[in-house]
Amino acid sequence: MRNVGLYWFGNDLRLHDNDNLLKAASEVDALLCIYCLDLQWLMPNRYGLVTMSANRLRFLKESLLDLDKQLQQLGQHLLVCYETPVKAISDLASEHNVSHIFRSRQTGYYEIQQGLALRKQLPLIQFSETDTFSLFALAQLPFPLEKLPNTFTQFKNAVEQLLVDTPLPPVKFLPSSPVLKTDWLSRFPEYSKSTSKSEHEIIFHGGETAGLKQLTNYFASDNASQYKEQRNELDGWGNSSKFSPWLANGNLSIRQICFNLNNYEQQTGANESTYWLFFEVLWREYFQLYAYHHGKRLFTFKGIKQQKPLTSFYPERFRKWCSGNTPYALVNACMKQLNATGFMSNRGRQIVASCLVNELAVDWRYGAAYFEQQLLDYDVASNWGNWQYLAGVGADPRGKRHFDLEKQTQQYDPNAVFINKWQGGIQHLPLDSVDAADWPVAAG
């Protein structure tokens, strides 16, 4: 009897270092390769935002096209389904007598729930999950997940000496598909193009091919040896690795990045900056486990600490923050950069998040949801975990982080080069157009 498999692509849109895809190739006689783009992502959510901005949709489309092209070179093709994964996969499994379903292990609560719902609906199908998104498999950790350290420093000290597995070679063979290729591209949602006219606009192109090119180019330069000194710059392509969008979509493997970093250190020499790149990788790993461990508490107002922040939701303040129209020029410039490009530096993210929570007193979850909508490198664990951290309801032992915006401006943009480039100038208008009694507030 012929075994028919289904590979459910998600945050693993690549052929290199993909243990699950190699496993599928060896265990089934025919294989469906699918990606589910739920059109609900384009409808307003509980925060009044869509899940994917035009920039995110463009990057995803490019990633899927690149993956489809590579699959076709192996005699396969990608099937994109525009409905919920549970319905799409259940229908395909029934129609094609699927016996095996392969999926990368997820860390997000809702993604995990989708997998559990599918297992319940398809009890006779064999499910296979492996770690393709994280640095370490759960079995490699020196502690059980329920004993995840409460702080990053404790986690780092426990894992930084662990050996990182060598990345696996790209898949060279896949069983053929039992379905004909479809014109999924014609049904891909339309999106508006960026209105930014900046000649310096940061541009990322999605896909494994582009991700691997950036990986090669970065380590062919000496930027890794200067990473710690440059990483807080607000702009500039070479000031950080720029791997994060391809990592978030699974176009790049985190183990492949560490492998190339290790080769770079052996050839060029290790220093504090090259270590700091690995340090940032460990932060990412910590938040993956953090999300997996804490589940839906990742999205609650009180966070994992069950401490209620002294914030609320002020619609007007939130809208001004989103559009870059606050009383803070550096914040405005960062938000306009994000809206135009889908990217913001790590320093910029901390600055604007601190502003939303501390200066504007807005519920941190709205900021996290806006980042989810806009960021090309949106990753559920890193995004929501970092926002909890800054809001004082997460893993930070110091509590809420409050950045002095004037000091940050003087330190990172003393000559207003970044502010002027992204037109962050302040309009001298009141933060709220009405006071507590709903009386109009006079300008001036």
Image (cartoon, rainbow, N blue to C red):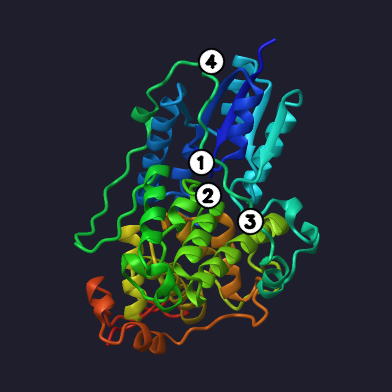
Position of residue 327 relative to residue 11, above or below, is: below
x then y, percent, for residue 7: 58, 30
Q: Which residue bears the numbered disc 2?
A: 253
Q: Which residue is mark 3?
A: 164
Question: Decide: marks 1, 2 in contact (CB < 8 A)?
Answer: yes
Q: Quadrant of the N terminus?
A: top right
Amino acid residing under circle 3: Val
Q: Taking 362 as reference, is 45 above or below it?
A: above
Which secondary structure, mark 2?
A: loop
Q: Cβ–Cβ below 8 Å for labels 3 and 1?
A: no
Q: Which mark is on residue 72?
A: none
Q: Element under label 4?
A: loop
Q: Which residue is mark 1?
A: 16
Q: Identify the residue at horizontal 41%, vertical 21% (top origin).
A: 182
The amino acid type found where label 4 is placed reads Pro
The residue most toward the front is 267
Which mark is first along the chain, 2 or 3?
3
Which amino acid type is marked by label 2? Answer: Ser
Q: Is 171 left, or right, of 344 in this rendering?
A: right
Q: Any mark on residue 178, and which?
A: 4
User: How far across and down, in percent of the image, does residue 356 sit?
Assistant: 47, 74
